[in-house]
Amino acid sequence: MTATSQAAKPLAGIRIADFTVHAAGPFCTHMLSQLGAECIKIESALRPDIFRKPHAVYGRAGPATFDQVASNKFSVRLNLKHPEGVALARRIVAASDVAAESFRAGVMERLGLGYEALRAVKDDIVMTSVSSSGQSGPDSHFAGYAPLFGAWGGLGYLSGYSDGPPMEMRHVMDHSVGMNAALATLAALHRRRRTGQGCHVDVAAREVASSLVGEALTAASAGVEVPRLGNMDPQHAPHGLYPTREEDRWLSIAVATDGQWHSFARLIGRPELARDPRFATAPDRVARRAELDRITTAWTEALEAEAAAKALQYVGIPAHVSWRASDIAADPHMAQRGAVVEVAETDDTRRKAVGFPARFSASGAPGLDRGTPGLGAHEDYVYGELLGLGRAERSRLEEARVIY
């Protein structure tokens, strides 16, 4: 990273004391760090972020998730169970603009790092708390991970096939929560700039999930139960994912208008379907979607996915191959825009990671300037330059397992 590139970013000059763990909270601060905020990740060898550990479920010996939510951050070790560790944490907050955390409601207060305690050392601090059900209310004591957020928020129930159970929502739920938390944090910073006042931002993950099912809530208020639709659309058919002659290579097709339906019928060599009264209107086609799915599948199964997608697009029908992660990683468009970048892991292995999904014409491009931080890798800067601790004092704190 160069000072020039960092200073050109939209959030240059903002510092975050980052107490977040796992995925939802860290993704919030990860987004802000890519926008130029200096993010100091506070953890401990006693309780390192769980995502520093290998994730066998992803088929990798290394910490597959940590790279995606921690690259670009500084890291310091700090034992928050020790009184001197709490005192040091307060000093870091005093030098920061934002304090972010994602523990269960009440944990920060018990540590002596609640909002009022942090206001005492930085009266205009913006504190962002990400939790399962929020900092107040009868369910605030519940902890939770991404599958719980989606299930409790109602999004999981709507996701899946009509003849199957609700789907488990994983990282997309964590990252949706993190993105909402980042937006709320920016709003609080803007308010502070106008008024000089900080505030406590309370983000409930299950409420984020519920905010994504507004149409279903509206229907429920009118006494209408919204079913799971899988890849179907309530107004359009054919609509969904269809197999091709390539193994596990699926084609997304959405026929929305009568004109697209007529073009589709001609393209697949069945022009008589466009004249068939059974399929004359969109409601007719939706009512007979099962038959249309069989007709569509018979056509797509004989073709390569990319060729079929191009043929459909050529006649004005929305269609695309359902891309795998490997397709995204190899895509020259994504690479040119910086949407997919390389990051260095803690062992200097380089691999692909997701960049920031927006660009700014009047400032430096958001993105990753550093690799994944090793545990405590930036203590010379944070404890030495920022807090002014001498080498002897740092050694004493390390021996006392305060910095540990």
Image (cartoon, rainbow, N blue to C red):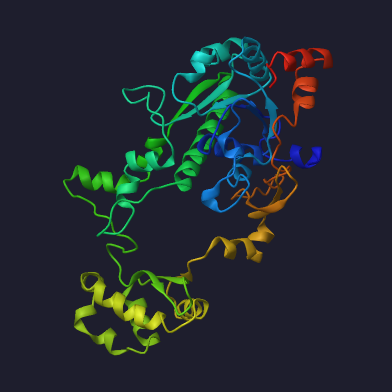
Give left or right: position of 284 versus 114.
Answer: left
Q: Residue at x 46, y 70 (%)?
A: 248
Q: Position of residue 201 (x, y in %)?
A: 49, 26
* Residue 388 seen by the camera: no
Pick the front one: 59 or 68: 59
* Residue 304 seen by the camera: yes
The residue most toward the left is 223
Above or below for 110 versus 334: above
Give left or right: position of 5 versus 120.
Answer: right
Image quadrant for the N terminus? Answer: top right
The image quarter containing residue 389 is: top right
Give left or right: position of 234 versus 385.
Answer: left
Q: Residue at x 27, y 48 (%)?
A: 216
The image quarter containing residue 285 is: bottom left
Q: Position of residue 71 (x, y in %)?
A: 67, 41
Above or below for 404 versus 223: above
